[in-house]
Image (spheres, grey):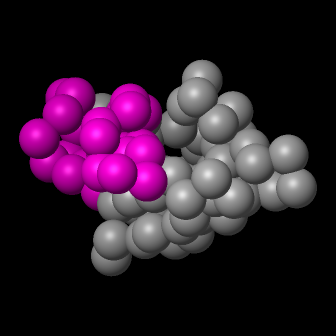
Amino acid sequence: PILIELDSEDNIYIAGRTESFGAGLYDIFLLKYNSTGDFQGEFIWGGTDMESLSGIALDSSENIHLTGNTLSFGAGNSDIFLIKLSQDIN
């Protein structure tokens, strides 16, 4: 699924998964656009296997939180992940 979130300055965050980046089956991505639609940055994360995204949220400081599961990291089958990024996608 594609997930979309807006911050208080009307910046647009679009998150999902892709086969286009990295060496794994699926990686997750986050794209940021400003209120006029200009591209502001991207974040791509994944390993050698499959990652899937299940949620995106902004906290009161407008940090971005991504949640989902991964088969690339950890032991056994699927493990959950939580990634926290600042508003400038770092």
Farthest front residue? 36
Q: Which residue does the image show at 52% across and 38% down from the upper left?
A: 73
Q: Is residue 2 above or below residue 18?
A: below
Image quadrant in which you'd find residue 47 = top left
Q: Is residue 37 left or right of residue 72?
A: left
Count of numbered circles in the view: 0
Image quadrant in which you'd find residue 41 = top left
Image quarter where the N terminus lies is: bottom left
Q: Indicate yes or no whether the magenta region holds residue 38.
A: yes
Q: 22 or 34: nearer the eye?
A: 34
Farthest bottom residue? 1
Q: 55 or 77: nearer the eye?
A: 55
Q: Indicate yes or no whether the magenta region holds residue 54.
A: no
Q: Is residue 78 visible from the viewing direction of this image?
A: no
Q: Which residue does the image show at 22% across and 29% down from the upper left?
A: 22
Farthest right residue? 60
Farthest top residue? 90
Q: Is residue 36 left or right of residue 55?
A: left
The part of the chain drawn in magenta is 17-44
Q: Is residue 6 above or below residue 86?
A: below
Q: 13 or 49: nearer the eye?
A: 13
Q: Which residue does the image show at 30% across and 51% down from the upper left?
A: 37
Residue 21, image x and y in percent? Answer: 18, 34
Q: Is residue 71 above or below residue 22?
A: below
Residue 81, image x and y in percent? Answer: 64, 51
Q: Is residue 25 left or right of residue 75?
A: left
Q: Which residue does the image show at 88% across and 55% down from the upper left?
A: 60
Image quarter where the C terminus lies is: top right
Q: Is residue 88 visible from the viewing direction of this image?
A: yes
